[in-house]
Amino acid sequence: MRHHPEMRKGHVMRISRAVGATIVGAFALSAAACGSSDSGSGSGSGSDGAVTITWSMWAGDTAAEEKLREQMAAAQEVVGDDIVIELATAPWADYFTKLNATLSTGDAACVTAMNGQRMAGYHQAFLPLGPDELATAGIAEDDYNAGALGVMGYDGTLYGLPYDTATMVLYYNADLFEQAGVALPTNEWTLDEFRSAAETITEKTGVKGFAVSLDEFQWLSLPMAYSGLQPVNEDMELDLTDPDFVEAATWYADLVTEAGASDAPPSASEVSWDANQFTSGSAAMAIDGTWNATTYTSGNEAFTGGVVRIPAGDSGPYGVALGSGYGVAATCEHPEEALQVLGALSGPEVQAVVAEQGGYPAQLDSQHLYAEALPAEYADGITEAFDAAFEGADSQRVVDAWTQVSEAFPTEIITVYTGQSTMADMLDKLQQRFGD
């Protein structure tokens, strides 16, 4: 590994050209046909008196399912022989179709996976988790930071427990920074420094300084940092037309339309375009999730790269906590046993397995295990970036229509990048369509 003069030990990683497209859907959700053989409600009682609790979770391939089975084995040790955990998996692409079908018949798995960004639209399907429910699960709210726990809540009520936590960070190509004579990013970087670097790299190297995105928080993160605002306000209302947010989003689009520091994606279907631009060496910087950190450090030696928190705007650093987790179906016939399984899948024993598998645990006391599982040469740099990125991160705020809003972003924002509409007009259109 080649080190650059400005780099601290552990602050670099070797990025593969081949890994971009597989990462963007890391938080994508899938579930399974959710009932057990004994009961359509995701639970049943065997002949030996044990209660079977079905756990539905996404798994895109055999390797992913094997990881889940390792987690299930650890959870089974916790709950003992009186409860049998049964894993059911299916691809993300099938999840909502199957979930909607099982919800309509009352057959949802007793423990069901849910992505935090989509909890608002499905919260009524889950059992609210108050003090009694958390006690049964053996979980305390203090086990998490507020931002991580909040992703599994809606309107002040908790409906699930996160198994991981994530936020968005800035990945950079150190080789291009060196070629342009630009100092490397730090965790104290500002948006002014970011934009100056993007423009200088574009001018000096002929490679674009940044890859803009079409996809949800990959594109929203910089406008949020610029304005200190989320697209959903503190009153839990969609607020895409707040003047400060519009100004920030326009600044972001100007990286393409005015500064020329980014290329426009070729079409609205290219939601992995920014990741591909970065991993191929066609852009010097990109915003992506913390879940990419270990993947970006493996594979072919393409260029030396690093990761820092999102650059700060005038009001200081700003980020949101993202994540996924599990809840207990409101229709579950064995809620007490399901809560015990929920607690086991969310607890320290399984959190240790998640860390060993490369995930960033949601529970505070387990997060150090993630760093311990990283190769020593870049563990310090990733850990420092994560610590900076998560410090003070707010919970993502969503509205019932958030899934539709996020799905509309690619088609609408491409018109801004190509000059067919303005950012203000695009955001107003979505506000009129999905706002109250």
Image (spheres, rainbow, N blue to C red):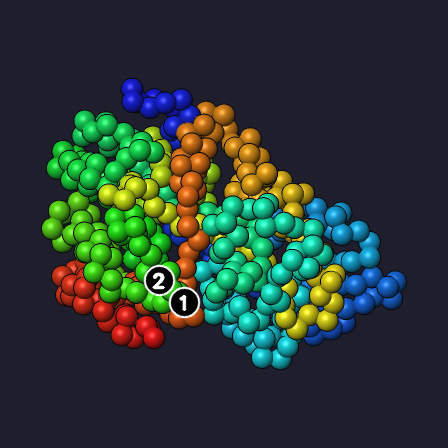
Q: Nearer the viewer, residue 55 or 392?
A: 392
Dot 1 or dot 2: first in sequence order is 2
Left or right of 221 in this view: 133: right
Q: Quadrant of residue 354?
A: top right
Q: Quadrant of residue 126?
A: bottom right
Q: What residue is pinned by disc 2?
A: 232
Q: Nearer the viewer, residue 27 or 239?
A: 239
Q: Residue furthest top?
A: 5
Dot 2 amino acid type: Val
Secondary structure beneath disc 1? loop
Task: Classify mark 1: residues with Cα within 10 Å, few (<14), some (14-19) or many (20+).
Answer: many
Residue 360 visible to an observer of this rendering: yes
**Numbered label attached to residue 131:** none
Q: What residue is pinned by disc 1?
A: 399
Dot 1 amino acid type: Val
Residue 301 visible to an observer of this rendering: no
Q: Are marks 1 and 2 in contact (CB under 8 Å)?
A: yes
Q: Quadrant of the N terminus?
A: top left
Distance Cα–Cα, label 1 vs label 2: 7 Å
* Identity of the residue drawn at 60% across and 65% down: 128
* Identity of the residue drawn at 15% across and 66% down: 421
Give the x, y percent position of residue 377.
Answer: 46, 25
* Identity of the residue drawn at 54% across and 75% down: 100
